[in-house]
Image (cartoon, coloured by chain):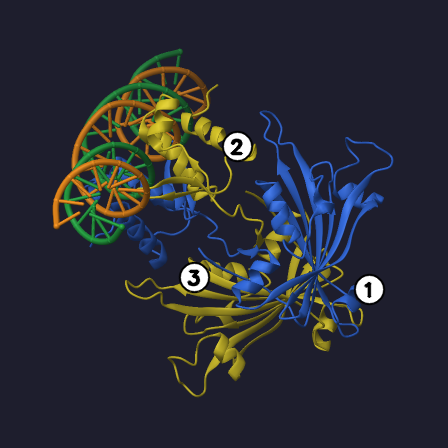
Chain colours: A blue, B yellow, C orange, D green
DNA sequence: CATCTATAGTTGTATATACAACTTATCTTT
DNA sequence: AAAGATAAGTTGTATATACAACTATAGATG
């Protein structure tokens, strides 16, 4: 019986919703009503309502009241994390090989993705480029291709990516960031087929991701692209998994 | 200048972390220290620290202090949502065709995925089965295959899924749930190729998802599987996109 | 009838206080 | 030196209070 009071109130509310007694759009008791019902202070009742609001179960309108959220999301979240962490979390062995690590001229497409066309019009624009192959128990599982904004990460080409993954290095150098990614099924180029030791015509799971720095300014939400990554996985050896509790 | 005090403190802390002044693992000022520095009550300073903890930026240890979180996640989240919502959000037209809607015997594989082998040993086990084809501007974009636990959703077969999507119907019937999903790149069966009007040998993005009800019990986390869904998308016409701010 | 006005109710922010639970370092005792 | 007790500091929970900001309703006014 050593549960905090606000947890008791949260469970009470969740139960009503799960039972269908309170349906989406319905109003739930106000802070004052709950504080009286449970004989707690208003701040304690408030905490229960606030936490359920943060987790998306309730919605609050100042002056009006608190309501059961409309779309208890059928859509769900999938976490995309570092391949090294993913492999070691499965209890397997991870190692990486560096295929390419060089400075490169960038074409129009990459230029656009890195947002370099907007501000910095240096005609001889280059970026750092890396190709790293990741193994799970000596089986190739991911080919990682990255285009890095060298203005923001000048020392990228000096790293040894058999010791630290590019992902981990970047998260060290640029602590807080924002991301943007998309997933496709493609039949990938022959070179990648070869590196991943894939059978001919096997589909390929392709994850593309851009990472931004977050420079907070008072007015606008200005961001700079740090890197653009493309991850290729053999369709018969890899799947992207996730789990979430609402 | 009408920002709440706790927001000012949050920005102050985030700035220190973004500048690298406070690095992962470092301690940040205590509630008392902050309340003195900003001339606010301890509860107000506490709110700033608590909200940053909730969002994963800080970690708190009772009795010890508050620290900058270790892994500011390089892994990120991808939202998977209803195809209908996704299409209308793009400003396009969505409609659906029901290919199959029937009761089916279930084989061992599905039985296992629906957790029906554990408790309910009725030998003639059946489930509801549906195949619905979704169109974006009259182009087929997703084939949705579902296996439904009829014990939990008895009226599934009576619905008209050209009017309401199975996803929306299920979220109405089972308000709060838990999900579990994985994504693969496959070359899919001929029948699905045909329905999606795909060119031969085009890769296919396959999303599998199980949805559970959450029956809260005091001791164990008991769940029942409501449905198992498999979503097929033509690799050259569909990509799964997401965005998240940390 | 339409419009404006007051009012009660609700959420948002903030303070001051109290005690409980836990950690860490210091001091005391053995 | 090792073990145990003490104290100071920190986070967690909870109360009581106050005022601000906003909503919706009922009532008064034109």
Write the residue at 60% across / 59% down: A84
Q: Residue A218's x, y, as percent?
A: 58, 25
Distance from label 3 to label 2 (Cα)?
48 Å
> Dot 3 surroundings within 10 Å: few (below 14), some, or many (20 or more)?
some
Q: Quadrant of residue A20?
A: bottom left
Front-lying residue, B60 or A96: A96
Write the residue at 59% across / 56% down: A82
Mark nearer the N terminus (3 vs 2): 2
User: Do the residues bearing badges 2 and 1 touch, measured as CB atoms within 8 Å?
Assistant: no
Mark number, residue A191 = 1
Write the residue at 24% across / 46% down: A5
Q: Quadrant of the N terminus of chain A?
A: bottom left
Per the image, the residue denoted by label 2 is: B21
Judge from the rendering whether residue A161 lies leftward or rightward of residue B27; answer left or right: right
- Tell me, yes or no, whether dots 3 and 2 are on the same chain: yes
Q: Is residue A239 visible?
A: yes
Q: Nearer the viewer, mark 2 or mark 1?
A: 2
Q: Nearer the viewer, mark 3 or mark 2?
A: 2
D23 above or below B78?
A: above
Q: Quadrant of residue B129?
A: bottom right
Mark 2 belongs to which subunit? B
Q: Is residue A61 visible?
A: no
Q: Secondary structure at mark 1?
A: helix
Distance from label 2 to label 1 (Cα)?
44 Å
Per the image, the residue denoted by label 3 is: B174
B238 above or below B59?
A: below
> Dot 1 surroundings within 10 Å: few (below 14), some, or many (20 or more)?
few
């Amino acid at each position: 019986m050593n549960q905090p009071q606000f947890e008791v109130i949260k469970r009470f509310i969740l139960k009503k919703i799960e039972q269908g007694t309170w349906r989406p759009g319905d109003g739930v008791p106000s802070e004052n009503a709950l504080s009286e019902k449970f004989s707690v202070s208003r701040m304690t009742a408030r905490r229960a309502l606030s936490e359920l609001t943060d987790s998306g179960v309730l919605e609050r309108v100042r002056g009006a009241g608190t309501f059961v959220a409309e779309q208890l999301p059928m859509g769900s979240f999938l976490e995309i994390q570092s391949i090294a962490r993913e492999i070691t979390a499965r209890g397997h062995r991870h190692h990486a090989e560096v295929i390419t690590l060089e400075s490169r001229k960038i074409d129009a497409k990459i230029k656009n993705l890195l947002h370099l066309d907007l501000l910095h019009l240096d005609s001889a624009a280059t970026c750092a480029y890396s190709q790293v192959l990741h193994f799970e128990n000596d089986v190739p599982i991911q080919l990682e291709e990255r285009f890095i904004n060298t203005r923001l990460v000048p020392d990228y080409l000096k790293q040894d990516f058999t010791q630290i993954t590019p992902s981990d290095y970047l998260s060290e150098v640029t602590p807080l960031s924002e991301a943007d990614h998309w997933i496709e099924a493609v039949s990938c180029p022959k070179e990648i087929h070869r590196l991943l030791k894939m059978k001919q015509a096997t589909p390929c799971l392709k994850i593309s991701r851009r990472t931004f720095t977050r420079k907070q300014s008072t007015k606008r939400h200005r961001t700079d692209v740090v890197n653009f990554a493309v991850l290729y996985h053999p369709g018969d050896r890899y799947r992207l998994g996730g789990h979430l509790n609402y």
